[in-house]
Amino acid sequence: MKKLRDLLEKPWFSMTFAVCCGVILYMFLSNLAHIFGGLGWIYQLTTPVVIGIIMAYMMNPMAVWFENGLLQSVVRDRTRHSLSVFFTVLILLAALVLLILAVIPSLVRSLAALAGGFDSYREAAAVYINDLSRWASDLGIDISELISAFNNTLNKVAENMPAYLNRVLEASHNMGAFLVNLVIGFILAVYILMSKQSMLDTINRLRHALMSEEAYRQHNAFFKRCHTILISYIGYSLLDAMIVGTTNAVFMSLFRMEFTPLISLLVGTTNLLPTFGPMIGAALGAFILVLVNPFHALLFLIFTLVLQTIDGYVIKPKLFGGMLGVPSVVILISIVLGGQLMGAAGILFAIPFAAIFTFVYNEALLPWLEARKDKKEVPAEAGASGPAEPAEAPSDQK
């Protein structure tokens, strides 16, 4: 230990150590893609298990609600738990069937109509562009560059349409494999929910053996807080996406716009992505509508702006309340890093992870550092003051 302390005090050692750490960090960041790529085959093998764990985690609040609410009168714990899992699975399957019957057929028809009528949409858009150019020329406004950019975009989309269709077919093939993993994961999720209590008892017994009682209590409070943040965020985000998507569908239906199911699904899905999601949904929906009716595209953009304003300032604050309390810069950094590391899933869970990091930093790390500092300062002050001198004995007064 003394030799190591002597080395640390030498200037050349600290400089060498810093350079080595910098080189190791650079090599790690430069080969990050290869590192994650090497772990990709492990992820492929464990995908059904990961999906099952995530689905069980998402289904658990509904099962707990059944178990502690509607089924509270059932005496036997095992029977009550089994019935709660059964009703949870039944409701989810019923919701899935309703979704398939209500949305999927119209969605398929919209996609087929969009792909099959692209040439006619292109010709109609050219007519609208010529009318707009003539109107702008009458007013003395030069929009030639804007029209040229729009035409170039349409031409590129038309040229790449076969490639896009091939990608859709490839995605359909990948979707089939994903659906198989989804079915396997759902079955695993049911088994995980059924044996949840025994699994938790085993994990808690191991934690009790490894931790002190105080550490065990602190860890329970930490995990409970993380669970509350994640479940609340996911549930409220799904509810908010349903509200936005349904409102958009009602608006488009009132104005008899084309591709209402497709665009409403896009708007609701992209609304799950924080910050940039609503802009992506608005851009995709407007691009689809402008091929059919530019006036409808303009109405859609205006309505989306109003809807997202209401959603951002009224609906989301009512749903989330003060649950997150994350600074904007932390959210932005989390979205960028999450998107780079885990794609859409990283963007989706960037905000709850940022919230967890923020409360750990404010309520655990900072108090620990401050307490550590206070412990160091108290002995130093006591040593500086020195030992107290003994008080003089009072003299006898006569």
Image: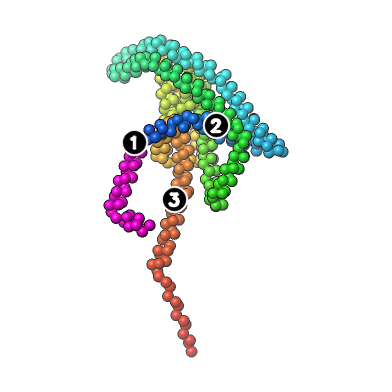
Query: Does the magenta-highlighted stretch encompass residue 393?
Result: no
Q: Position of residue 69 (x, y in %)?
A: 66, 37
User: Magenta region, mostly helix, strand or loop?
Assistant: helix
Residue under label 3, please give it: 366
Q: Amino acid at mark 2?
A: Gly
158 to 61, vertically: above or below: above
Q: How many neighbours does mark 1 have within 10 angstroms: few (below 14), some (14-19), or many (20 or more)?
A: few
Residue under label 1, please give it: 30
How much space separates mark 2 and mark 3, taking CA atoms? 36 Å
Work out whether mark 2 precedes mark 1 in sequence or the reverse, and give the earlier one: 1
Mark 2 or 3: the one toward you: 2
One can see residue 274 in this view: no
Q: Amino acid at mark 3?
A: Leu
Q: Which residues are magenta?
A: 1-29
Q: Position of residue 241 (x, y in %)?
A: 50, 29
How much space separates mark 2 and mark 1, taking CA atoms? 33 Å
Q: Amino acid at mark 1?
A: Ser
Q: How many neighbours does mark 3 have within 10 angstroms: few (below 14), some (14-19), or many (20 or more)?
A: few
Residue under label 2, please give it: 52
Work out whether mark 2 precedes mark 3 in sequence or the reverse, and give the earlier one: 2
Q: Residue at x 39, y 14 (%)?
A: 162
How much space separates mark 1 and mark 3, taking CA atoms? 32 Å
Furthest residue toward bottom: 398
- Disc 2 on helix, strand or loop? helix
Q: Residue at x 52, y 29 (%)?
A: 48
